[in-house]
């Protein structure tokens, strides 16, 4: 992921760059907040646990940092994988699909920064990494997240019914959004 793109990627207001181990502390400041970690897959017990989780090489390699005026204001998730195919299909895909995700500090929400960062991420995925299909998932109750997916032009593909266990809400619905390279180009 990091080798194919000339990082950092800059937008009007933001800088996107691969995460480094030393970013973990700044990420913890917003990720530990209840209004953020409510929607995240992993709730860590404290800074030490978070540091060791976030600095795992595989995790680190899938994390991008969003900076505004030199401050870490959020992070993006980017994991490129092989799309599904029948084993004997000609032209079986290789590293053609990416799952993306995002977290923005509540101190910086409501200004379009996530939209700006994710639009740049889409461009990187389609233009530089040669991704064919992008996918993102959220709890259906996480309206801020799926509204962001819609703002950047992603298409609602699936609603899963009581398919995901939320630590406070129990079994809840999920949504999957996707976007194809040719849809994005159009
Ligand atoms: C999901 C998340 C990143 C969305 O953040 P956000 O601030 O709502 O999204 P943006 O930064 O794109 O800002 C959009 C808002 O800013 C407003 N805005 C202001 N200036 C803007 C601009 N120049 N451009 C676009 N939008 C702008 C928009 O109208 C919108 O407000 P609205 O929601 O009241 O309509 C954030 O809620 C979050 O981090 N949540 C916790 C973690 C999480 O749930 N992650 C996803 C797990 S699936």
Image (spheres, rainbow, N blue to C red):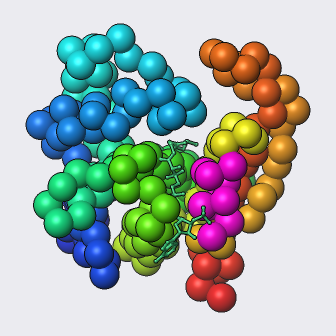
**Can the viewer see residue 68 in this picture?**
yes
Looking at the rendering, the stretch of residues picked out in magenta corresponds to: 143-151
Residue at 56% x, 55% y: name it.
Answer: 97
Horizontal side of 72 relative to 121 (left or right) equals: left
Image position of 94 with respect to 113: above or below: above
Horizontal side of 86 relative to 30 (left or right) equals: right
Task: Say which quarter of the image contains residue 129.
Answer: bottom left
Nearer the observer, 171 or 155: 171
Task: Say which quarter of the image contains residue 178.
Answer: bottom right
Image quarter (top left, top right, bottom left or bottom right) of the C terminus: bottom right
Image quarter (top left, top right, bottom left or bottom right) of the N terminus: bottom left
Residue at 60% x, 61% y: name it.
Answer: 148
**Can the viewer see residue 90 in this picture?**
no
Residue found at the very far bottom of the displayed protein: 186
Residue at 24% x, 19% y: name it.
Answer: 47
Image position of 155 with respect to 51: above or below: below
Image position of 142 with respect to 131: above or below: above
Image position of 145 with respect to 41: above or below: below
Q: Position of residue 53 (x, y in %)?
A: 30, 22
Q: How many marks?
A: 0
Task: Say which quarter of the image contains residue 121.
Answer: bottom left
Q: Position of residue 58 (x, y in %)?
A: 32, 33
Residue at 24% x, 64% y: name it.
Answer: 68
Q: Position of residue 69 (x, y in %)?
A: 17, 66
Is residue 40 shown in magenta?
Answer: no
Main secondary-structure element of the magenta-colored stretch:
helix
Q: Position of residue 85 (x, y in %)?
A: 70, 49
């Amino acid at each position: 992921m990091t080798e194919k793109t000339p990082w950092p990627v800059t937008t009007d207001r933001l800088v996107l760059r691969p995460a480094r181990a030393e970013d973990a502390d700044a990420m913890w400041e917003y990720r530990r907040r209840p209004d953020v970690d409510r929607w995240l897959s992993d709730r860590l017990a404290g800074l030490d646990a978070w540091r060791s989780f976030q600095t795992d090489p595989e995790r680190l390699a899938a994390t991008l940092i969003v900076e505004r005026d030199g401050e870490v204001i959020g992070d993006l998730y980017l994991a490129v994988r092989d799309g599904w195919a029948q084993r004997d299909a000609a032209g079986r895909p290789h590293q053609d699909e990416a799952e993306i995700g995002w977290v923005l500090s509540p101190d910086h929400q409501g200004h379009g920064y996530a939209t700006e960062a994710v639009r740049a991420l889409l461009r990187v995925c389609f233009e530089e990494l040669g991704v064919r299909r992008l996918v993102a998932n959220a709890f259906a109750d996480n309206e801020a997240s799926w509204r962001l997916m819609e703002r950047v032009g992603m298409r609602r593909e699936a609603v899963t019914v009581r398919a995901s266990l939320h630590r406070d809400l129990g079994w809840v619905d999920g949504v999957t959004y996707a976007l194809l390279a040719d849809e994005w180009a159009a």
